[in-house]
C-alpha cells in the first residue's frame, strides 16, 4: 500500500466496501444459484424465447419513440425560456421517481378501455388493451425521461457558442440543428438511448398493471421471470441471468460512450 | 464532524444487526401466521378473536401469494402457521420436512365469472365467454387460480382464449373492475371482497374445480400455533370463513 496518497481515511474506505458488497453479493448469489446443467434448456424454451424476443422488439420500439420525442423535448428544455418551464421539466421527469405501478394505473386511466382517451381511440378502431402496443406505451412512459434528462445535460454542457457562430454565418435554425447541435451531442443521444433501452427492458410494474400478460403478446422477460418463479425457480434464475448479462452489456456500452466523449 | 459520522455509522450497524436477530419464534409474544392473500378478511377477524382469547400474544399476519409464502418459509422465514390457497403449495413445504404436524383442510373456494357490476354484456355461462369480442382474463396455469381455471375448462369442455394470463387472482379482478377486460375467472370470495365494483356469475363446472385450503403448524412452533389452527378449524373460525363466502371442507 505504498505510493500515491489517496487522501481517504481508512474507516471511510471500510464503509464504502460494505456498500459495494451490498450491491455485489446479491448478484453473486444469483449466479451461484444458476443450474448450469439445465441453463441452455431453460433459456431456450418456447416461453423464454417468446419473452426475450418480445422484450427486445418492444424495448427497441420504445427506444425509437424515446429518441423521436425525447430529442425535441430535451432541445426545448435546454435552448428555450418560457414561463412554467421549471414546472414542466419537473412533470416530464416525474416518471423517473414514480413507482412504475403508479405509471401503469395512470396509463390505464388514459389509454384504457374506459380511460380518458380510450373511448375516442375505440371509436377510431384502435383497441390498445392487452396488445403489444400497450407494452410499448408502458415502456416509453418510464424510459422517455432518461433520454430527456441525459440529453438536456449534454446540450447544456455543449453550450450555444457553435450554434451562434453557425447562425451568424447564415445558417437557418433547422440547418443549425442538423449540422451543428445534433452532431455535437450525438454521444449524449446514444447514451440516453442506451439508458432508455435498459429501462424499457426492465419495465415490469407498469406493463403488469396496464398491458396484462400473455405469451408472445404482452409477456415480456421480466413478467416471464415473475411467473416462472411460481413453479420453476430455476427457470426464473436462468432468465434473470440473461437480463443481468444484457444489463452488463448496456453498462459497458454506456461507459464506452462516456470514455469516448471525455476530453 | 468525524465523530458525528462515526456515531451515525455505528447506529446504522447496530440497527442492521438488531433487525437481523429477531427471529426467535413465539418467545416475543408474536405468532407469525403466513396465509394466502385471499384469506385476508377472515384471517384478520380470526386473528382478532385469537388475540382476545390469548392476552399478551399478538398475531402477525403475512398475507401474500401462496407460492411466495412457500418460498419464504423454505428459505427459513419465521413462520409458525402456514395456510396456502392450495394443497400443492403445502406439499412443497411438507416435502422439505418443515411441517410440525400433518396439514388439515379448513376451507374450500370455487371459481366464478367476474363481470362488470350489473353484468352489462349479459354473460350467463362459460360458453358466453367464447363469443367474439368478449375479452376474458384468466390466471396463468402456474398459480392456484389458473390451475382451477384449467380444471374448470377441462370439466366443461369449453376452451377459453384469454387476452391475458395474470400472475394472481387480484390482477384478474383488477382488469375486470377497471373495465379493461369484460370477464375473468376468480374465486367467489374475491367478488365478495371486491364490494360493488364487480358481480359474480356462477357456472356449472365450478363445482368440479374446487380449491381446498390446508393449514399446518410449521417447524418447532409451540402451543400458540396449534391453538390458532384449532380456532380456524373450530366452530367460530368456520363461521367467520363462511361469512366471507368460503365453503366448508368435505368431512
Image (tube, coloured by chain):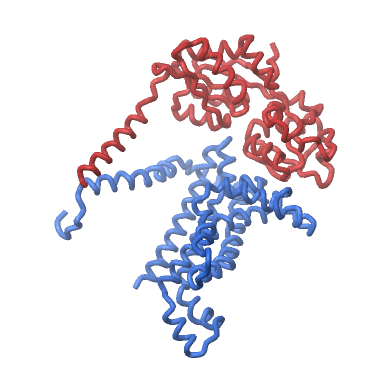
Counting from the top left corner in percent of width and height, residue B122 is at: 85, 37
Quadrant for residue B38, please give it.
top right
Q: Along the line of sight, which residue is nearer the eye, B27 or B218?
A: B27
Q: Along the line of sight, which residue is nearer the eye, A187 or B193?
A: B193
Counting from the top left corner in percent of width and height, residue B78 is at: 44, 24
The residue lying at 39 percent from left, 18 percent from top is B28
Q: Is residue B83 above or below residue A92?
A: above
Counting from the top left corner in percent of width and height, residue A230 is at: 57, 36
Quarter of the image with the C terminus of chain A is bottom left
What number of labels is visible?
Answer: 0
Q: Chain A takes which shade in the image?
A: blue
Left or right: A40, with B155 as reference point: left
Q: Chain B takes which shade in the image?
A: red
Residue A246 in view here:
yes
Q: Is residue B32 above or below residue B67?
A: above
The residue lying at 59 percent from left, 60 percent from top is A62
The residue lying at 44 percent from left, 66 percent from top is A153
The residue lying at 68 percent from left, 36 percent from top is B173
Amino acid at each position: 500500500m505504498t505510493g500515491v496518497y489517496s487522501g481517504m481515511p481508512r474507516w471511510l474506505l471500510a464503509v464504502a466496501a460494505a456498500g459495494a458488497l451490498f450491491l455485489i453479493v446479491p448478484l453473486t448469489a444469483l449466479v451461484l444459484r444458476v443450474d448450469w446443467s439445465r441453463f441452455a434448456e431453460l433459456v431456450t424454451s418456447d416461453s423464454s424465447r417468446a419473452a426475450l424476443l418480445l422484450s427486445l422488439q418492444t424495448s427497441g420500439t420504445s427506444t425509437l419513440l424515446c429518441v423521436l420525442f425525447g430529442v425535441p423535448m430535451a432541445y426545448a428544455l435546454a435552448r428555450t425560456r418560457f414561463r412554467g418551464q421549471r414546472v414542466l421539466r419537473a412533470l416530464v421527469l416525474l416518471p423517473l421517481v414514480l413507482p412504475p405501478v403508479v405509471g401503469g394505473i395512470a396509463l390505464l386511466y388514459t389509454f384504457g378501455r374506459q380511460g380518458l382517451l380510450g373511448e375516442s381511440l375505440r371509436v377510431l378502431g384502435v383497441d390498445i388493451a392487452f396488445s403489444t402496443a400497450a407494452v410499448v406505451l408502458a415502456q416509453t412512459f418510464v424510459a422517455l425521461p432518461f433520454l430527456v434528462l441525459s440529453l438536456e445535460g449534454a446540450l447544456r454542457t455543449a453550450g450555444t457558442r457553435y450554434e451562434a457562430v453557425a447562425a451568424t454565418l447564415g445558417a437557418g435554425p433547422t440547418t443549425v440543428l442538423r449540422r451543428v447541435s445534433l452532431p455535437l451531442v450525438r454521444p449524449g443521444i446514444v447514451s440516453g438511448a442506451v439508458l432508455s433501452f435498459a429501462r424499457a427492458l426492465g419495465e415490469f410494474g407498469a406493463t403488469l398493471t396496464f398491458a396484462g400478460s400473455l405469451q408472445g403478446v404482452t409477456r415480456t422477460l421480466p413478467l416471464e421471470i415473475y411467473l416462472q418463479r411460481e413453479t420453476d425457480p430455476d427457470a426464473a434464475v436462468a432468465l434473470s441471468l440473461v437480463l443481468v448479462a444484457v444489463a452488463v452489456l448496456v453498462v459497458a456500452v454506456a461507459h464506452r460512450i462516456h470514455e469516448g466523449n471525455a476530453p | 464532524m468525524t465523530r458525528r459520522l462515526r456515531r451515525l455509522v455505528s447506529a446504522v450497524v447496530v440497527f442492521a444487526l438488531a433487525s437481523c436477530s429477531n427471529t426467535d419464534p413465539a418467545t416475543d409474544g408474536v405468532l407469525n401466521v403466513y396465509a394466502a392473500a385471499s384469506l385476508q378478511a377472515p384471517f384478520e377477524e380470526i386473528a382478532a378473536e385469537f388475540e382476545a382469547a390469548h392476552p399478551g400474544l399478538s398475531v402477525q399476519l403475512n398475507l401474500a401469494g401462496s407460492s411466495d409464502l412457500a418460498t419464504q418459509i423454505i428459505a427459513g422465514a419465521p413462520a409458525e402457521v402456514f395456510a396456502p390457497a392450495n394443497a400443492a403449495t403445502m406439499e412443497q413445504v411438507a416435502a422439505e420436512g418443515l411441517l410440525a404436524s400433518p396439514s388439515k383442510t379448513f376451507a374450500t373456494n370455487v371459481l366464478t365469472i367476474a363481470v362488470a357490476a350489473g353484468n352489462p354484456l349479459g354473460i350467463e355461462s362459460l360458453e358466453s365467454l367464447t363469443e367474439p369480442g368478449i375479452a376474458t382474463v384468466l390466471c396463468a396455469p402456474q398459480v392456484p387460480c389458473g390451475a382451477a381455471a384449467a380444471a374448470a375448462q377441462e370439466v366443461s369442455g369449453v376452451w377459453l382464449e384469454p387476452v391475458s394470463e395474470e400472475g394472481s387472482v387480484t390482477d384478474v379482478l383488477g382488469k375486470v373492475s377497471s373495465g379493461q377486460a369484460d370477464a375473468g375467472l376468480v374465486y367467489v370470495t374475491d367478488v365478495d371482497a371486491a364490494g360493488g365494483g364487480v358481480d359474480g356469475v356462477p357456472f356449472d363446472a365450478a363445482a368440479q374445480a374446487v380449491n381446498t385450503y390446508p393449514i399446518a403448524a410449521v417447524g418447532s412452533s409451540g402451543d400458540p400455533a396449534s391453538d390458532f389452527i384449532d380456532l380456524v378449524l373450530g366452530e367460530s373460525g368456520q363461521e367467520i370463513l363462511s361469512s366471507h363466502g368460503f365453503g366448508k371442507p368435505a368431512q
